[in-house]
Image: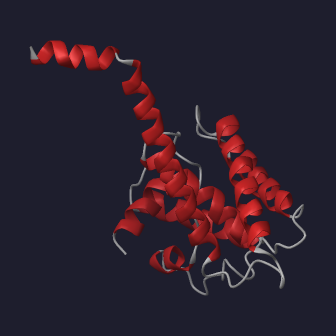
Amino acid sequence: MVDQEVWIASKNPMTEDIKQEQKEFLKEQLWSSTIGAATSRAGNIYKVGTTGEDKKSFKKALHEFVTEMIQNHYEATTLDEPTHLKNIKELKEYTTRFGFVNFRFGHAQKVLNLYLKYLWCLGLVQEPPHFPVDRLIQQKMKIKNPTNWTKNMEEDDYIKVIEEARILATRENFKSIAALELSFYNNL
């Protein structure tokens, strides 16, 4: 009788709806965590006088933009580095449409890379080409004079960290820099 119940549940369209709802719930929670991590230590990314409604509208639009970018570029394959860097720059550029936001390269890389990391850990996207670069991971990698990612990280600074990570991943026998960062982060 139990086998029949399992079979019926597996054929029930409601079961698939629930699984999709569970995925969407997790994605929303991870997005919220991503935005918090990318902006909480950044000081105020909003100009004085920005309303709560404007902030909410910005976060919603940013989520839609990043979600579309991930669907188009990251779900089916691990993206090449030049395209990934282009996507980070496009994300930063997109935020300039919102005149009340001061979103730097460091914020853009953190948003895209952290959200990709979360989705990768859940098996919803392929392994990302990079990882979220912040002070903690730079310190764990023993980078001298880590760049303050919230204030003055530009593309050149970011690439230097990625290059250091490649050297370290090879030396430590990690298959990728994303795997290296995940291991380092889990052992902070």
Is residue 5 rendered to the left or right of residue 35? left
From the viewer's perspective, is residue 14 above or below residue 137? above
Identify the residue at image location x=46%, y=49%: 26
Instruction: State the residue in front, 164 or 134.
Output: 134
Q: Where does residue 98 sit, x and y in percent of width and height?
A: 87, 65
Does the image show residue 52? Answer: yes
Q: Quadrant of residue 5?
A: top left
Is residue 59 rendered to the left or right of residue 30? right
Instruction: State the residue in front, 70 or 3.
Output: 3
Placement of the N terminus among the 4 image quadrants: top left
Identify the residue at image location x=41%, y=33%: 18
Is residue 25 rendered to the left or right of residue 38? left
From the viewer's perspective, is residue 57 above or below residue 38? above
Q: Where does residue 165 sit, x and y in percent of width and height?
A: 54, 64
Q: Where does residue 62 sit, x and y in percent of width and height?
A: 73, 56
What colour scheme was applied to this rendering of the protein? secondary structure
Is residue 62 rendered to the left or right of residue 161? right
Does the image show residue 123? Answer: no
Question: How many badges with numbers are in the image?
Answer: 0
Instruction: State the residue in front, 174 or 74.
Output: 74
Identify the residue at image location x=76%, y=62%: 58
Placement of the C terminus among the 4 image quadrants: bottom left
Q: Where does residue 133 sit, x and y in percent of width and height?
A: 59, 69
Farthest residue, direction left? 1
Identify the residue at image location x=82%, y=72%: 101
Q: Quadrant of residue 144?
A: bottom right
Instruction: State the residue in front, 69 or 99.
Output: 99
From the viewer's perspective, is residue 17 above or below residue 92? above
